[in-house]
Image (cartoon, rainbow, N blue to C red):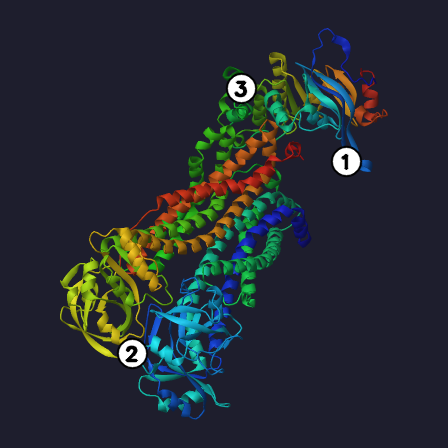
């Protein structure tokens, strides 16, 4: 049987190519994402161990507040340095000041802040403790505002030794570059920008109090282990400080990176790999179904000659294994290409990988090949078993079989599963919302649609193809009939496209709803004329002096800033909003249930009504809070306001927070123009001030809404880019199926050509069939996507404790519909051309 | 045995013009040592309004001749004329159009498009041309083949004989210059086969249709007005008013170029052979 297998494979190269390509693409995507994941892991993973290479122990504050992925720890006294240095076992110790600071490039644009952090601190003079090394031609900072910057920033910002530029801390500070440093072998630490002052300057600029540091890094004497060192340090540590080993620190930092970024990134990639594989599975199943149907005759002949059913199935299985192995191996190689492409894509979006060489784990190879093999074998098994059941003589009699698949059981099962999935999806949107439930429901609906597809394929294809006879005459009519003649095949071909379109539809709906939500929120809550919004989410925010400077402009009635303050209340870490109470109420249109913002001063707090209710707090009561510097304070409730989305649940005055702030930063400045001042004049005046502080551009309400919408669209672009690959797989699946279908219908095509169908008419017939099938998948996908998009929007809203509006992006969905139809037409181009090129005589020859 | 290559001149006055003419038609497959001459310098005219059978053993070139005359295959040498049209001068598009508008086909099997009803199959060439079929004529044809009650059925719902009748109706519906039938009764039992041949006969007699049929079946040849015999790519004989016995006899002699008489028949048929 093995010889027949290989002979069969060799003899039908095109078939094998068709089978291979489907598996190849699915495996390529899976292996690409696996390799990208492991590359990211290794690239980022080594960063921290390298950064902490010389660090055997770290002494730091034990208070830390972590909210929204940002941790703020308390400060230490600089005087601790001597006591540490005198301890047994300590060979080296250096004080560390580590804060956020943004370098401004030679062209006046701030660098970084779109992913990796923007770091500022002191230059560590001890070579063994400092992971950064000076490039030749520069030196360490020695006084004043001399700085060393990282090599990547020097390149990106076109800065050189001797240049003068500005660093935002967040106020702009003039600096002189005296040195450029590399991080080990790399030009930066994972894309993070770094600027180092002298210790004195760093303390002065970056810390709120003199004589403080962020931590101490300690190197051990030869022969002293890290744990021993920590033990030695323990007795001399004052309250509120702790010492941990370098290894523990690395582990901590790597864990934080995983949970904040890498973990999410990899899950994201795997979900898409899953979608691509699901789409590929349909293509593979389809291809095998057709191939096996074509070979029914061969199998029947073998059976008539005495081969057992098991041998026949075995031969198909063997073919499946061979194809699976070959395609998986090739797919693995193609996946490396995809991984490279994704690295480049991420780089183009500002998220650079520290190293560009791919890391391929053996496990990735094994997983990719095993998955490809399993999927191929399973996909080939079902049609193989079915084919082996055909009676030998029946198959040899060459009947043009048009199998209809409308069985009552299938219809019932399909309805039940789809309905069940829909119910589950909706359940996930009520009450407190449950994303996992909604997700499960979505999956159920997909399965249900797979089941019910063949049942509805005929009537729906008939409906969708109705205009074809009118547009393309009899060829159009034939195309429509062809799409209807084998509902099972039509359905499974369309299913791959359906899934891709459904995911696109879901995300499009969610994005459009989010944008509508932002629009509503800003419309309803924002009462000012202009805003300046911080655009870096991983670095330094707006300078605290900015609001005041803008306020002083004659064109401006009032300007006020909102900032963020990490607090711990009731054991929970979260971000409170800092504001200038009286100024805020002039610009912000937030309804008050009780009290007034004008009363918000030092030692007071304003709460949202939801928060007050949840925690049983009323006007005049005390709320105990803890700050990152370790201080505890009781705040008095002076106002309760309507829960809204512009400010959080907790608002305190800037004066309350300032003494405990580790680094002040405002994230938005809201501006009300003086009466009679035109928008243009006002924007110009404010922009001039903003430029002085290297702040982002000032925007009016519409520009602001548009910029937020832009960000949402950017995220959407990444998702779409990944989905394009899934759509391509679906497209190839349709082309494959079509090709093989045409091959099956060779005689029929020959007959049509013999009685006078022109080549052009034949091509149009093939295109029409493909168009209907693709439309079937697209319409189904849009329907499912719209529904799931609604459900997801509701579930997200519930999870975030708000309610998101449902905005159906009709225009975009129409575009998707057109694209779907185009996919059908494009997929048909080659099969149509090949079918039209058939030699009529060879086609109709009776053998 | 006379090796004529044109029709016997017995009815010169009433002999109709040739609907299809092959002139020095040659078809060679392959090249050099492996070259096969499927047709070797064949010149023949097939009369209009007549039922002509083309016969010969396998490998004689009869199918090749028909394919070339029908515009389905091209000659290596010589030419084929349908009426005044030289097939060799036509482009693929023109050939397709010729087949659509002026030629009818009846194949041995797989004649119909499975997704179309009988009525739609009959109207297919007209629809491809974007023409409205002639209602009255199509009704006549349908009644001739006796398919009035089966028009809305798909091929899968028709018997083999009924399918061939649909094919005949389709071929007749377009009133083509010539209908080419390739072993039309090959897949049918003798009764259905006889029905088909009778329809074809009626079409020639009552409607003046020209039919050229390739067959190896002597019974089928008996329905024709003339039988052309091919062997090794050449016309070796033309028989007028063939009967199944005479054709069978002639075929036997085609297979064996030197007369080899089977012992059983030697005494029996000697006197009666004409």
The reply to whether callout 2 and callout 1 are in contact (CB within 8 Å) is no
Query: Separation of disc 2 and disc 1 at Cα?
Result: 94 Å
Query: Separation of disc 3 and disc 2 at Cα?
Result: 99 Å
Q: Is residue A550 above or below residue B60?
A: below
Q: Secondary structure at mark 3?
A: helix
Q: Secondary structure at mark 2?
A: loop
Residue count near mark 2 (Cα–Cα under 10 Å), binned few <14, some 14–19, many ≥20: many
Q: Position of residue A420 (x, y in %)?
A: 35, 52
Question: As drawn, which residue projects farthest toward the top?
Answer: B13
Q: Quadrant of the C terminus of chain B?
A: top right
Question: In this figure, which residue is indicated by the disc labeled 3?
Answer: B142
Marked residue chain, label 3: B
Q: On the rendered structure, is B53 left or right of A321?
A: right
Query: Separation of disc 1 and disc 3 at Cα?
Result: 44 Å
Q: On the rendered structure, is A726 left or right of A172?
A: right
Q: Nearer the viewer, residue A816 or A839?
A: A816
Q: Position of residue A429 (x, y in %)?
A: 30, 55
Circles 1 and 3 on the same chain = yes
Residue count near mark 1 (Cα–Cα under 10 Å), binned few <14, some 14–19, many ≥20: few
Q: Choose mark 2 or mark 1, whichever is in front.
A: 2
Q: Nearer the viewer, residue B251 or A423?
A: A423
Which quarter of the figure has residue A555? Answer: bottom left
Question: In this figure, which residue is indicated by the disc labeled 1?
Answer: B30
């Amino acid at each position: 049987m093995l010889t027949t297998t290989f002979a069969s494979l060799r003899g039908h190269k095109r078939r094998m190519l068709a089978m291979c390509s489907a598996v190849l693409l699915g495996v390529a995507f899976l292996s690409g994402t696996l390799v990208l994941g492991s590359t990211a892991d290794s690239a980022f993973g080594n960063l921290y161990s390298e950064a902490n290479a010389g660090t055997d122990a770290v002494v730091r504050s034990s208070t830390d507040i972590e909210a929204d992925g940002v941790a703020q720890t308390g400060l230490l006294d600089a005087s601790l340095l001597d006591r540490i240095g005198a301890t047994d076992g300590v060979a080296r110790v250096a004080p560390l000041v580590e804060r956020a600071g943004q370098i401004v490039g030679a062209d006046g644009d701030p660098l970084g802040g779109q992913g990796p952090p923007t770091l500022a601190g002191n230059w560590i003079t001890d070579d063994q403790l400092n992971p950064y090394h000076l490039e030749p031609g520069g030196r360490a900072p020695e006084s004043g505002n001399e700085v060393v910057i990282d090599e990547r920033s020097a390149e990106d910002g076109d800065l050189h030794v001797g240049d003068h530029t500005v660093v935002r801390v967040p106020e702009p500070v003039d600096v002189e570059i005296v040195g450029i440093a590399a991080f080990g072998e790399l030009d930066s630490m994972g894309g993070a920008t770094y600027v180092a002052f002298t210790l004195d300057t760093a303390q002065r600029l970056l810390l709120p109090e003199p004589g403080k540091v962020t931590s101490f890094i300690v190197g051990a004497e030869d022969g002293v282990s890290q744990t021993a060192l920590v033990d030695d340090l323990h007795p001399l540590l004052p309250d509120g400080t702790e010492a941990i080993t370098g290894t523990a620190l690395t582990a901590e930092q790597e864990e934080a990176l995983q949970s904040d970024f890498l973990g999410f990134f990899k899950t994201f990639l795997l979900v898409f790999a899953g979608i691509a594989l699901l789409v590929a599975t349909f293509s593979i199943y389809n291809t095998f179904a057709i191939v096996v149907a074509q070979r029914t005759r061969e199998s029947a002949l073998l059976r008539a000659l005495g081969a057992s059913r098991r041998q026949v199935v075995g031969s198909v299985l063997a073919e499946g294994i061979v194809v699976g192995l070959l395609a998986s191996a090739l797919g693995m190689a193609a996946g490396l290409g995809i991984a490279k492409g994704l690295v480049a894509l991420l780089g183009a979006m500002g998220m650079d990988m520290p190293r560009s060489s791919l890391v391929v784990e053996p496990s990735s190879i094994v997983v990719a090949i095993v998955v490809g093999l399993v999927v191929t074998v399973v996909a080939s098994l079902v049609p193989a078993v079915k084919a082996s059941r055909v009676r030998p003589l029946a198959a040899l009699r060459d009947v043009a079989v048009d199998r209809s698949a409308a069985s009552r059981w299938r219809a019932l099962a399909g309805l039940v599963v789809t309905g069940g999935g829909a119910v589950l999806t909706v359940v996930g949107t009520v009450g407190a919302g449950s994303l996992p439930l909604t997700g499960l429901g979505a999956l159920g609906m997909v399965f249900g649609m797979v089941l019910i597809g063949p049942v509805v394929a005929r009537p729906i294809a008939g409906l969708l193809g109705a205009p074809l006879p009118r547009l393309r005459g009899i060829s159009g009519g034939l195309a429509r009939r062809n799409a209807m003649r084998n509902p099972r095949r039509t359905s499974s071909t369309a299913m791959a496209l359906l899934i891709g379109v459904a995911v696109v539809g879901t995300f499009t709906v969610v994005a459009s709803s989010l944008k509508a939500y932002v629009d509503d929120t800003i419309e309803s809550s924002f009462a000012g004329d202009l805003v300046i919004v911080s655009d870096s989410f991983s670095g330094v925010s707006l300078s605290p002096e900015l609001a005041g400077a803008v306020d002083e402009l004659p064109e401006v009635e009032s300007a006020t800033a909102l900032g963020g303050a990490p607090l711990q209340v009731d054991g929970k870490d979260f971000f409170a909003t800092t504001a200038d109470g009286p100024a805020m109420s002039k610009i912000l249109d937030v309804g008050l249930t009780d009290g007034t913002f004008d009363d918000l001063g030092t030692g007071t707090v304003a709460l949202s009504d939801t928060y007050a209710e949840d925690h049983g707090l009323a006007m005049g009561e005390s709320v105990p809070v803890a700050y990152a510097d370790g201080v505890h304070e009781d705040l008095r409730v002076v106002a309760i306001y309507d829960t809204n989305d512009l400010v959080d649940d907790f608002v305190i005055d800037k004066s309350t927070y300032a003494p405990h702030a580790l680094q002040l930063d405002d994230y938005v400045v809201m501006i009300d123009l003086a009466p009679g001042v035109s928008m243009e004049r006002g924007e110009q005046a404010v922009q001039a001030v903003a430029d002085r502080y290297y702040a982002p551009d000032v925007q009016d309400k519409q520009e602001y809404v548009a910029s937020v919408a832009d960000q949402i669209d950017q995220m959407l672009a990444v998702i779409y880019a990944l989905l394009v690959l899934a759509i391509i797989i679906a497209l190839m699946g349709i082309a494959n199926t079509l090709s093989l279908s045409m091959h099956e219908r060779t005689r029929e095509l020959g007959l049509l050509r013999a009685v006078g169908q022109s080549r052009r008419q034949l091509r149009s017939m093939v295109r029409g069939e493909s168009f209907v099938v693709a439309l079937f998948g697209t319409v189904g996908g849009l329907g499912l996507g719209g529904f799931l998009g609604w459900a997801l929007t509701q579930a997200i809203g519930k999870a975030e404790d708000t309610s998101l509006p449902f905005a159906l992006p009709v225009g975009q969905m129409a575009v998707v519909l057109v694209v779907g139809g185009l996919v059908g037409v494009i997929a048909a181009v080659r099969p149509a051309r090949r079918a039209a090129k058939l030699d009529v005589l060879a086609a109709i020859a009776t053998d | 045995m006379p090796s004529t290559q044109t029709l016997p001149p017995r009815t010169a006055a009433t002999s109709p013009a040739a609907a299809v003419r092959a002139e020095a038609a040659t078809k060679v497959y392959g090249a050099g040592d492996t070259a096969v001459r499927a047709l070797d310098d064949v010149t023949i005219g097939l009369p209009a309004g007549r039922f002509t059978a083309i016969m010969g053993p396998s490998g004689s070139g009869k199918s090749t001749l028909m394919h070339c005359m029908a515009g389905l295959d091209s000659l290596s040498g010589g030419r084929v004329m349908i009426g005044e049209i030289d097939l060799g001068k036509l482009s693929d598009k023109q050939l397709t159009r010729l087949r659509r508008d002026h030629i009818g086909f009846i194949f041995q099997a797989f004649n119909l498009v499975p997704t179309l009803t009988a009525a739609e199959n009959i109207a297919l060439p007209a629809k491809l041309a974007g023409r409205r079929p002639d209602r009255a004529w199509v009704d006549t044809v349908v009644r001739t083949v006796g398919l009035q009650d089966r028009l809305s059925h798909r091929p899968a719902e028709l018997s083999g004989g009924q399918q061939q009748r649909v094919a005949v109706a389709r071929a007749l519906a377009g009133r083509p210059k010539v209908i080419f039938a390739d072993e039309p009764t090959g897949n049918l039992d003798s009764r259905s086969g006889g029905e088909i041949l009778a329809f074809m006969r009626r079409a020639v007699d009552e409607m003046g249709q020209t039919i050229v049929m390739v067959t190896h079946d002597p019974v089928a040849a008996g329905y024709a007005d003339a039988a052309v015999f091919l062997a090794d790519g050449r016309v070796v004989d033309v028989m007028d008013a063939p009967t199944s016995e005479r054709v069978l006899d002639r075929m036997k002699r085609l297979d064996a170029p030197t007369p080899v008489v089977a012992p059983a028949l030697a005494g029996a048929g000697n006197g009666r052979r004409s």
